[in-house]
Structures are given as C-alpha cells and as structure tokens.
Amino acid sequence: MLQRLFKAAAVLATLVPAAARADAMLKGFPYPHPVQTFSFTSQQQDLSMAYMDIAPAGPAKNRTVVLLHGKNFCGATWEAVIDLLSKAGYRVVVPDQIGFCKSSKPEAYQYSFHQLAANTKALLAKLGVEKPIIFGHSMGGMLALRYALMYGPEMSGLVVLNPLGLEDWKAKGVPMATLDQLFDRELKVTAESVKRYEQNTYYSGQWKPEYDKWVDMLAGMYAGPDGRSFAWTQARTADIIQSQPVVHEFPNIKVPTLIILGLKDNTANGRERATPEIAAKLGNYPELAKETAARIPGSKLITFAELAHSPHIQDPAQFNPALLKGLEEITAGK
C-alpha cells in the first residue's frame, strides 16, 4: 500500500512544471523509491548522503549491487536498472554522492575519487553490506574503478558502464582547465544545452519523450535559487575528472570485472580545448574498448555497436539481458 502511494505521489510530482521544481537539492523531483539519508562527518563537516535501498523483488540471490551515478546523472536515473536487478533477486543500493542531487553540497570540500569512494564505503558499512558488486556509469564508472583499487578484496564484482577515464586526456595533449574556467562553463548550462549534449552524446543523435525528465532533473539544479552554488560544485567535480586519471592503474584491478560500452559514445573530456588534430583522436570507443579489456586482468567485455553513452536508458531491450548474463558470469563461484 505504501509503495503504491509513493508511486502515485511521484506521478503527481511530474505534473508540476519543471521551473517550479527547480532547486539544487531536487526537493520537487520524484525518485522511483523512498529516499533515506546517511548522516556522517567528513573533512570536519556534518554531511547528509541520500540513498535508496531496494530489497529483492524476486528470489533473493544474497548479493547487493551498488549503483554509482555519473556527473550529469543522479540515483533516479538508474530507475530501470533498479527494477531489473531487484526483480532478478539482487538487493540494490543507490547513493547520491556528496555534491550531487539530493545529497549535501558543501561550499568548501576537497573532492576526490578517493574521498567519494570512502564516503560510499562508510554508507555500505552502516547498511551492513558485505562483498558488494560495485556498478558505476560515466563518472561513476571512474569512481567504481577507484573503489575497486582501494577496496577490491572486499568486493565480489565490478561493473563499469561507459565509464569516463578510459584514456588520459591530459597525457594525450588536452590542456588542463582552471577551476575558474570550469566554473564559467558550468554557469552557461541551460535546459537547451543539456538536451543538445545528451542527444549527441548519450543517445546517438536520437531523442525520445521519456528522456525529457532527465533534462529537467539536471537543468533544474542549475536553474534554481542555489544554481550558482551548484555550478561551483559541478566545476570542482569536473576538475577531479580531468586531474585524477585511473587508466594507468587498470592492471592493478583484481576484482572480477564486467565492462559494458556503447561504441557510439563520443565523450572526451576537454576536447573543446584541444587542437583539431588531438581532438580527432579522442573518444575512439571501439579502440578504447579493446584496450581496456586487455589491461584489466580477466575482464569480460560487452559492446553495443549502435548505442552511445547511456545504453541502459537508450535501449533496455538490448542492455538488460546482456547485463544479467554478464553479472552471472563474473560472480560465478563467488
């Protein structure tokens, strides 16, 4: 009964104009499951980490999958994957990282993938989660890889879906951006620019009406009364993407790993700052797929030739069975 009421409230919330729901904490944006908060202290600050904790809806596998969102995403964008995994018998934990979505956005915080991984580990300890499967998408894939390097023996599997950081952009000649430059870029974000970028990068130039809510979600955080503060947070998290590469440590990953890539992805951090000659060589995902699989010991690779940065949203019919099969294969015997 409570679950039906929660879903009905979520549907009603979507009928409110996007402008009226704009705020950096997403108070008016519905999540697919009840949101809880984890209160903890980090860097001498009291913080609150939002998360969803979804029990298995099918026969339990006694496994927990932890879903890590990307920079332009939130826990809510995992909604279809949560439903898939829960029905398949997995417990699913979905945090919003500090600095994002419904979690605290401290004005003074030293962001790093190490720190976000440690925050996530603290949440899982509080929830009693042992031997999780860590599953990250986009920037969350970079975070998941760092988590595996830090806590690999305490994991039962690693899944990365179109992760950022499969190449070291700086080493390939992309100039670093200052925080001020990154902040200026974030201040220019609008709903129109979000949609344009997502259509080109996430969905292979396609667009469906069901993608609109993810534009509203992201653009609303920039457009609300705390939008400038949110843009500053986004600039600082953009900085860790450019300055904290993980690609050079791939051979050190010892966790059973599943790599899933839509090969039409064209993400290349800082491409706009590179020379045309360098820019043309970035974001070659067919090549990056092979290189990554070769460098992570024993990893399994799944590719989708016609899908882009968000295969789980773009084509669930292709993505879902491949994910479930891949999960079974990397965790067999674990």
Image: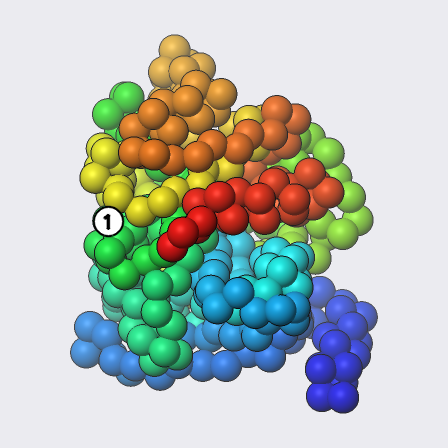
Q: Is residue 272 visible?
A: no
Query: Which residue does the image show at 44% across and 41% down from the upper left?
Result: 258
Q: Please tell me whether residue 35 is drawn above or below residue 311 in the rendered image.
A: below
* Quadrant of the rendering where the C terminus is positioned: bottom left
Return the residue nearer the eye: 100 or 128: 128
126 relative to 62 in the view: left or right: left
Instruction: Tell me which amino acid carries mark 1.
Output: Leu
Left or right, 175 with respect to 226, comes to left
> Residue at point 76% right, 52% down?
210
Q: Which residue is drawn at 59% across and 65% down?
A: 89
| Residue at 77% in and 82% down | 4
- 268 lies left or right of 46: right
Q: Position of residue 193 (x, y in %)?
A: 60, 43
Horizontal side, residue 99 vs residue 209: left or right: left
Does dot 1 land on a helix, a strand or a loop?
Answer: helix
Residue 17, how many percent across, how many down?
76, 68
Rendered location of residue 76, percent (x, y): 59, 63
Vertical side of 97 occupied by 153: above or below: above
Residue on which the image places disc 1: 149
